[in-house]
Image: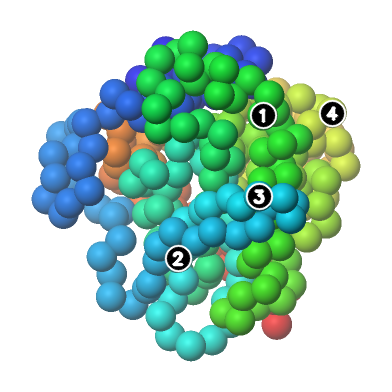
Amino acid sequence: MCVTDDCDDGTDRRTFITGAAGAVIGAAVMNAVGQTYPHNYKVVTRVLDEPRITHGKVVFQHGGKETIDGFLARPKAEGKYPPVLVIAGNVITEEYIPNTCAALAMAGYVGLAPNIFHTLPESARTPEERRLATMNHVDSDSLADIGAGMDYLRTQPFVKPGGFGAVGFCYGGHLAMMLAARSREIDAVVSYHPGPTTAADVARLPSPVQIHQGTADRNVPVTQIKDLEKVLRAQKTPVEVFWYDGADHGFLAYTRPYYRPNYAKDSWDRTILFLDKHLRKTTQ
């Protein structure tokens, strides 16, 4: 079982989602300023208490048959802001996911993390319970969940019409690229240590992609990212890859043991510059 971050060891999606959901259960995380995190670093990337933004849980329609929840953050100031989807590789209640939405709001975006793990009940604590709860929820279902979030954002008065950005982590990074390959509304993709992604998954992906990867990632091999970069370049997908020397899986997630504040800040600065370049010009 993964204990570092929303991770993938190359197994199929059903096995992965079981391990990913289990990862958060063992994390010693509290929701308070001044909390003790599972590392010795000062947290420099937490912005959930910033007074210039507003955030919280939202609920929206999912195919007209049920509802799905998510976490949304946006600037408090009146206006319309470009939307960015935050695609988690783990349950969205782990604080670094809401914080990612909040950090997007601080940069002038609307950040929404759709709950693609909504089939996982809180009562599912054992690996077998998690496997059973998610065994019929595959990539296409997760993409439909994300699509429901996009539909919700289109109806909000504070969302600027135009394209979307997508920021994904591990399995969520894999999904972000799959989404962009299937929807022409995704204008920019940022993928942190993406899970296994085949050429078929990203075929005809036109949107620019930015990848962040640690060189010491024990869940996503360096060779996997290099092969993915080759696939993207071969099909003329604009791509840039940033390597973080000695960083393990989940270096942006301050709720995890392998948080690296300097790399977290550097990668996030690059993320915002990338989104600004590709989203601001398409959402006038």
Helix, strand or loop for disc 1: loop
> Would residue 281 appear left or right of 157 to someone viewing this image?
right
Residue holding disc 2: 73
- At label 4, the amino acid type is Ala
Is residue 84 depicted above or below 16 in this figure?
Answer: below
Position of 14 with respect to 30 (left or right) is right
Q: Earlier in the sequence, mark 2 or mark 4?
A: 2
- Measured in 3D between alpha carbons, the distance from the residue under mark 3 to the one under mark 1, in whole angstroms, is 15 Å
Q: Who comes first in sequence, dot 3 or dot 4?
A: 3
Q: Say which residue appears at 83% left-offset and 46% top-offset.
A: 182
| Residue on which disc 1 sits | 137
User: For numbered disc 3, what is the local secondary structure?
Assistant: strand
Q: Residue at x 79, y 31 (%)?
A: 201
* Type of the residue with mark 2: Ala
Instruction: Say which of marks 1 and 4 sits in front.
Output: 1
Please provide percent x and percent y for residue 249. 42, 28
Query: Mark 1 or 4 closer to N-term?
Result: 1
In the depicted structure, whether residue 168 falls above or below residue 13 = below
**Would residue 215 be seen by someone viewing this image from the given angle?**
no
Real-space CA distance between mark 1 and mark 2, rounded to the nearest whole angstrom = 26 Å
Q: Which amino acid type is marked by label 3?
A: Glu
Q: Are marks 2 and 3 in contact (CB under 8 Å)?
A: no
The reply to whether callout 1 and callout 4 are in contact (CB within 8 Å) is: no
Characterize the local packing of mark 4: few (<14), some (14-19) or many (20 or more) Cα atoms within 10 angstroms: few
Of the image marks 2 and 3, the number of the one nearer the N terminus: 3
Q: On the image, numbered disc 4 is attached to which residue?
A: 200
The residue carrying mark 3 is 66
Image quarter (top left, top right, bottom left or bottom right) of the N terminus: top left
Quick one: label 1 or label 2, which is nearer the N terminus? 2
